[in-house]
Amino acid sequence: MPEHVLDFEAIKAHAREELQRNWTGEYFAPHLEGAFPDNFLWDTCFVAIGLAEDEPELAASLLLQLKRYQWPNGMFANQNVDATRPGTIIERANFRTDKSRDAPENLPTSGFSQPPMLAEATLAVAEKLDKDERSVFLDEMVPSITKYHEWLFDTRDINGNGLVTQIHPYETGMDNSPPLELHVMDNRTQMERLLTSRLIMAVFGPAIDSVRRDFRHAPRHQRMHNASVAQYQLLTRKLARAEYDIDKILADPTIPLVEDVTFNSIFVRANQHLQTLAEQAGIPLPERLRSQIDAQRSALNHLWDPYHKTFYSRDARTKLPLKIKTIGSLMPLYATKLPVPHRDHLLDDLTDTSQFWTQHPVPSVPLKPSFHHDGRPLHDSERYWAGPWWLWMNSLIIDGLEQNGDHELAAMIRHRSLQTIANLHRSSGKMAYEYYHPGSGEGLGVYPFSAAAAMIIRLVNETAEAHKGLAKALY
Ligand code: GLC
């Protein structure tokens, strides 16, 4: 990788311009031009984290805006449909959340959530607000996050083990991550197998292609397969029929359920953040929630595989691990300070050039296929969550490394990420891509992508901070 002097300020200003292109007047759509025009939960959290340092008031308004969509039962949906934009009929017909007694009235949203980054985003923003603004902001946000986390524990800890269950791969934010995608495809009913068969896909492929907004903005080999999209759609229909009610969902054995390692790692960390927030706001957390948080401390151990020495997501019904390594396997680093042997195994995998230590790390799926029953190659460097790297995932890994004491490795990933961005800045001026090729560093997916732009701003700020620290140490 050629080394160049990084012009931090130019990169940051440019990323801010890229972000602005997705501004709707109220929120930053992940990709306004078409692929993702709505307000997405963790995207908006990452945008707020990226903007916290330089524009804390704007960042706070984004989180307050999200809060408007919170369900009365506490849930935050992954996709909040902008009712003012034309043509939302497909989303409304698709999610059918009007069937749920828990959904908010007149606010179309999806019926499932996304990894709970809200506590971290709130903390990042609150730290940068002035005292009075902070206290108003926390008074708004803390009760709402408390309710969200209570909802997660009360409705989603279906095995009573401190792990929360995801009812749709979209809920993990990593749609076609191989263990999740294969789990859904392997659990299809006979009828679903027929409906998503090669033959039917060949016949209806052109019709599906024509409604896939993402195909208009990114090459199809970088997106999910039609059969998986169709099956995910069938799954959404089933969830709608079950009115998004967890008891009805549990009663339908054809709905695959997962205890996802990324979602749960983020939830463990989010609960630590919530405790900090509650203290800052002077709002005590309910006793019950506090004991749920305490009991959750050792929950990730259920996902540790002592034979392969890694963390796997697992089937929430059978409790069997989905034995495919992904970037999620490294996510417990972000959750907490791990016991040293666990940490060291994860660091070995992270720095292994045949797995996660690619030219441009950290890929969403390691290069070398990990153990999987039919030995299919799983890494695809260009396809969405099946191989490319994502700026926000890198940012979580960097944070996890810092937390686990490996500052050098954290600095290396930060530097390599920024170097890739700087190369793109120089060669094409386009930096904020949805994801990137782990071999060539090429930008992939849709452009400009909001959370990527925001994460670039964060990377620059953190690097500049580290340099200041170095300068201080030298003089
Ligand atoms: C895709 C991604 C998800 C993201 C959403 C909007 O579904 O997998 O993580 O939140 O797009 O950008």
Image (cartoon, rainbow, N blue to C red):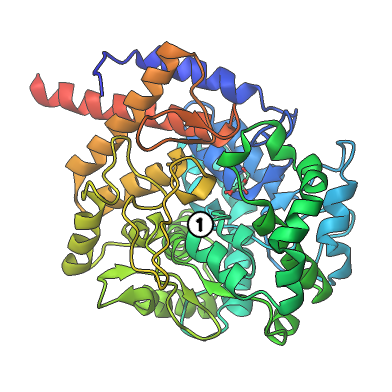
Q: Position of residue 367 (x, y in %)?
A: 33, 50
Pick the residue in front: 256 or 108.
256
Q: Is residue 54 left or right of residue 90?
A: left
Foreground of the two, 124 or 251: 251
Rendering coords of residue 51 (x, y %): 52, 31
Query: How many neighbours does mark 1 have within 10 angstroms: few (below 14), some (14-19), or many (20 or more)?
Result: many
Asked if 58 appears above or below 426 in the picture, the reply is below
Residue receiving disc 1: 177
For badge 1, the amino acid type reads: Ser
Q: 80 or 442: which is nearer to us?
A: 442
Image quarter of residue 252: bottom right
Q: Residue 202 at x, y = what percent?
A: 75, 52
Instruction: Say if 362 sits above or below 144 in the image.
Output: above
Q: Quadrant of the C terminus?
A: top left
State which quadrant residue 168 falls in: bottom right
- Residue at image point 19% right, 48% down: 406
Q: Residue at x 54, y 66 (%)?
A: 182
For residue 342, side relative to residue 215 (left or right): left
